[in-house]
């Protein structure tokens, strides 16, 4: 039988299983199996050469029973409606796992910003906000950065929203530059969260991080800061990659040099001739593997060849459900995306709280709060997996869905 690579339908399957295990009825599944709202927009943009190009965009809001929806915006050529829907469902799970007062949202535009000028990217970012402005806002749905979007794009989006509303609205979006109400620590937050999960997983597996061999797929916001943190920790980062290939050195790569040479899209391997493929990277002999790029990278085809004993998913959806089962049967400790990558949205929440109160915290304060939340969340999911005899992914879904399901019930929706 063909493996299911559709992120949306495979997420529905595991939501069903988790709700059954939690004792919720079919009506709750009917509610949570689809986003409450998906807006599809067409965004006409005048390109630098004078022609008009019409871009396809999406904003999906999975469930807003707990509070406003929250989640990033992705600019990528492969964005599609099912992917955005799945990503918004995963945001509900992340917020539930960490205990944030949000439901899940996510957005995306089908485009390749690597081939666009800064002016074109700015016009597209502003056009997107105009197109979705009716359904977003600081108490409705709060966007943030994701693949190929960054703090500059968040700044343009915040400026456009503030102009539309004739109100300065820093709480409309997170991941902003510090000077516009961004939070200390947000830029590094996803990687901080992944590092905390790696520390906790290594304790469970009895692996000493000092000297541990680590492979990271993706060298963007999540992957590059993670490489730096682990390198500084004393771990040996022996492999990294980007969209164009991968670098491998069994003695450890020079991470500071690579960080210095990477571009704003997380590309660095184009500077080197001696490369391996992303596929080969995933199968390298190592202790810890961190997919930190795109989805469907570990599938039934390559799961048996993975050598790592710990996989921590910084990316959203890098491992299929079939591969999860294979890895689990092989004794790999897999820390799922909805837990491992929740550091970003956690500090986005801190940013929104700071915007709402108009009082800002130090980086140390942000990092302490993040650590407290993520250590507790990791151990909650780990304990659920042990006591309910389920794998870490199903345990994370059980923990993550509970708040949305209970809030929907209290509101009388189900
Ligand atoms: N930025 C954030 O706060 C968060 C990001 N994530 C997830 O982490 C992952 C990476 O996101 P960011 O680092 O923010 O993105 P980014 O845009 O900063 O970097 C993306 C990286 O992935 C690489 N990449 C792109 N296509 C690839 C391909 N086909 N094969 C291999 N590598 C490829 C790029 O070259 C780049 O190094 C995504 O799955 C994202 O959804 C999850 C939670 C929060
Ligand atoms: O920071 C946020 O609000 C959302 C980050 C995000 O899109 C994600 O965790 O996938």
Image: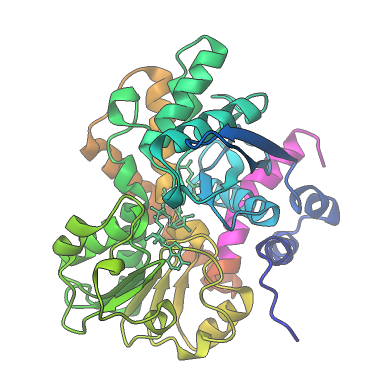
Q: Quadrant of residue 209?
A: bottom left
Please state the horizontal and vertical placement of residue 146, each as a whole percent of the image: 46, 48
Name above or below for residue 172 compared with residue 116.
Answer: above
Please state the horizontal and vertical placement of residue 288, each as a whole percent of the image: 33, 76
Front-most of residues 210 and 305: 305
Work out which quarter of the rendered image holds the C terminus and state it.
top right
Please state the horizontal and vertical placement of residue 314, each as a whole percent of the image: 42, 61
Q: Residue at x 50, y 65 (%)?
A: 336
> Does residue 234 appear in this view?
yes
Residue at the far top in the pictured view: 166
Residue 410 magenta-highlighted: yes
Front-most of residues 23 and 141: 141
Q: Residue at x 30, y 65 (%)?
A: 199
Front-most of residues 62 and 81: 81
On screen, residue 35 versus residue 212, left or right, reads right
Name above or below for residue 26 compared with residue 88.
Answer: below
> Does residue 65 appear in this view?
no
Please state the horizontal and vertical placement of residue 66, each as a whole percent of the image: 63, 36
Work out which quarter of the rendered image holds the N terminus and state it.
bottom right
Count of all numbered marks drawn on residues in the image: 0
Residue 88 magenta-highlighted: no
**Quadrant of the rendered image holding ligand 1:** bottom left
Q: Which residue is drawn at 32% across and 59% down?
A: 196
Magenta segment range?
A: 395-414
């Amino acid at each position: 039988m063909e493996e299911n690579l559709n992120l949306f339908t495979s997420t529905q399957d595991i939501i069903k299983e988790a709700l059954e295990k939690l004792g919720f009825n079919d009506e709750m599944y009917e509610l949570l199996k689809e986003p409450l709202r998906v807006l599809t927009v067409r965004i006409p943009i005048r390109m630098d050469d004078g022609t008009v190009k019409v871009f396809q965009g999406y904003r999906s809001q999975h469930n807003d029973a707990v509070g406003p929806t929250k989640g990033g915006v992705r600019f990528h050529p492969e964005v599609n409606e099912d992917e955005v829907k799945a990503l918004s469902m995963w945001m509900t799970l992340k917020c539930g796992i960490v205990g944030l007062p949000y439901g899940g949202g996510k957005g995306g535009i089908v485009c390749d910003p690597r081939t666009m000028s800064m002016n074109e990217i700015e016009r597209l970012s502003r056009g997107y906000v105009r197109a979705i402005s009716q359904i977003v806002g600081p108490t409705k749905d709060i966007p943030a950065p994701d693949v190929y979007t960054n703090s500059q794009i968040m700044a343009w989006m915040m400026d456009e929203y503030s102009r539309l509303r004739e109100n300065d609205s820093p709480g409309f979006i997170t991941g902003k530059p510090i000077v516009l109400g961004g939070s200390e620590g947000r830029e590094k937050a996803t990687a901080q969260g992944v590092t905390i999960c790696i520390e906790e997983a290594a304790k469970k597996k009895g692996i000493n991080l000092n000297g541990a061999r680590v492979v990271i797929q993706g060298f963007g916001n999540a992957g590059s800061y993670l490489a730096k943190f682990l390198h500084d920790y004393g771990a040996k980062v022996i492999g990294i990659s980007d969209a164009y290939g991968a670098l491998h050195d069994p003695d450890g790569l020079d991470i500071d040099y690579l960080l210095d040479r990477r571009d704003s899209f997380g590309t660095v391997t184009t500077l080197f001739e001696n490369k391996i493929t992303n596929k080969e990277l995933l199968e390298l002999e190592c202790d810890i593997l961190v997919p930190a790029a795109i989805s469907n990278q570990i599938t039934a085809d390559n799961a048996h060849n993975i050598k790592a004993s710990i996989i921590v998913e910084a990316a959203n959806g890098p491992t299929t459900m079939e591969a999860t089962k294979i890895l689990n049967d092989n004794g790999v400790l897999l820390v799922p995306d909805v837990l491992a990558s929740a550091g970003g949205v956690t500090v986005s929440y801190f940013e929104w709280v700071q915007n709402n109160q108009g009082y800002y915290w130090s980086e140390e304060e942000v990092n302490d709060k993040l650590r407290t939340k993520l250590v507790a969340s990791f151990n909650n999911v780990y304990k659920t997996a042990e006591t309910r005899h389920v794998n870490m992914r199903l345990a994370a879904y059980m923990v993550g869905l509970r708040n949305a399901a209970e809030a929907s019930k209290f509101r009388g929706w189900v």
